[in-house]
Amino acid sequence: MASRKSPAPQGLSPAVRALVDDIVAVRRDIHRNPELGFQEKRTSQVVEERLRKIGLDVERVAGTGVVGLIRGGKPGKTLLVRADMDALPLQEQNKTAYCSQVANTMHACGHDGHVSAALAAARVLFDERAKLKGNVKFMFQPAEEGPGGAMPMIKAGLLKGPKVDAAVALHVWNDLPVGTIGVRPGPIMAAADEIRITICGKGGHGAAPHQAIDPVVVAAHVITALQTIVSRQVDPVHSVVVTIASVHAGKAFNIIPPEVELLGTVRSFDKGVRAELPERIERLVRGVTSAFGAGYRMRYKHGYPPTVNDKRMSEFVKGCASQLPCVREVVEADVSLGGEDMAYVLEKVPGCYFFLGSSNESKGITSPHHSPTFDIDEACLPIGTEVFCEVARRFLG
């Protein structure tokens, strides 16, 4: 089995350099033992035990959520540092020494690295707490991949006692090479909504389609027509995606089924466009099904809102990262049509969600997120820790 262990990046501070082996060890331990959303019992226990050992005030919220608090030596503002903890329902195909030991469960999005980098930041900043003018609150969040752990933590009082003034979060990002930080003011992640459409026809014999109303044919027309919402109904300057990712119909080769179920996702950035999409989609589905003499049922479920970075906090994080010797380059990140429930935090307080470059082509670490061969260059993790620490120092300086 390959180890893929990377040497520590150049330019780390002595405090972070001393933690590199531990950062990697924690990430690999969590990677071997992945847990799905709201099932992160082992992971949250690891987090809680480590935070208590460091000396933080620790609280469990929203089931498997963990909050750790560093109280600075002087009064001041409070910065929230967020890391998500959950894995994905995916069978890992990597053959590394630290590959998942849990069937059909894998850290295929890098949340194991987020936890590790944030725990190291907690350790460094706790040792520097006397110099901090204010507090650092660490949010270890369950269920980012679904159904969403950020809002339950907020409802449990995450942003109070002490009141959070600003927030920062990172995401390892295999679209960027290790050593690169991606920051973007404004929208950086899309709203992620869900649609479920049932096409109601009339079943019959496959050899006598004239005696039936074939919902499979109707569904095919609906799927095709839905693409015109993006290409012909939405202003081209606004990014929108309508994807039908699942189609379920009959089971026999010669029977026309009575119904077809379509399941898909709708992604958007603009709040006005997002508000109009359910009606646009239903109007189109109604028209197509009516033309064929079929019926429909539709459910539109609003998911995470767009993740929108505060301009000032984005510039602040960019400035902090630019001053770190371990960071090779800070670039303006591309927007992503992925969804993120860090959006709920950023709706409440100004903050910055940034990308931590994690790919390394020379090592073959280039697989996309949510892939069964996803992995990261672990040299990125202490860089993420450095950015967290520098942002906290300056924000509370």
Image (cartoon, rainbow, N blue to C red):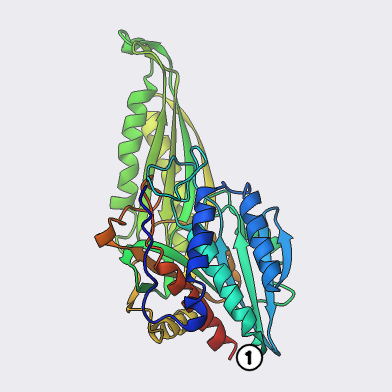
Is residue 178 something one can see in this rendering? yes
In the image, taking residue 256 as reference, residue 231 lies left or right, namely left
Mark 1 is on which residue type? Lys
The residue shown at (52%, 51%) is: 145
The residue shown at (67%, 89%) is: 130
Residue that extends furthest to the left in the rendered view of this protein: 362
In the image, taking residue 262 as reference, residue 360 lies left or right, namely left
Point out the image quarter for the C terminus. Answer: bottom right
What count of labels does the image hold? 1
Task: Measuring from the top left, give residue 141's x and y in whole percent.
Answer: 60, 59
Task: Measuring from the top left, give residue 117's x and y in whole percent.
Answer: 51, 68
The residue shown at (46%, 47%) is: 279
Is residue 292 something one can see in this rendering? no
* Depicted 138 relative to depicted 287: above or below: below
Foreground residue among 27 and 74: 27
In the image, taking residue 322 as reference, residue 68 lies left or right, namely right
Q: Give the quadrant of residue 223.
A: top left
Q: Give the quadrant of residue 282.
A: top left
Task: Measuring from the top left, give residue 374's x and y in whole percent.
Answer: 37, 51
Q: Residues within 10 Å of mark 1 (few under 14, many from 20)?
A: some
The residue shown at (37%, 62%) is: 377
Foreground residue among 336 and 366: 366
* Depicted 373 relative to depicted 117: above or below: above
In the image, taking residue 371 as reference, residue 390 lies left or right, namely right
Foreground residue among 67 and 2: 2
Task: Measuring from the top left, give residue 272's x and y in whole percent.
Answer: 46, 62
Q: Give the quadrant of residue 268.
A: bottom left
The residue tagged 1 is 131
- Disc 1 secondary structure class: helix
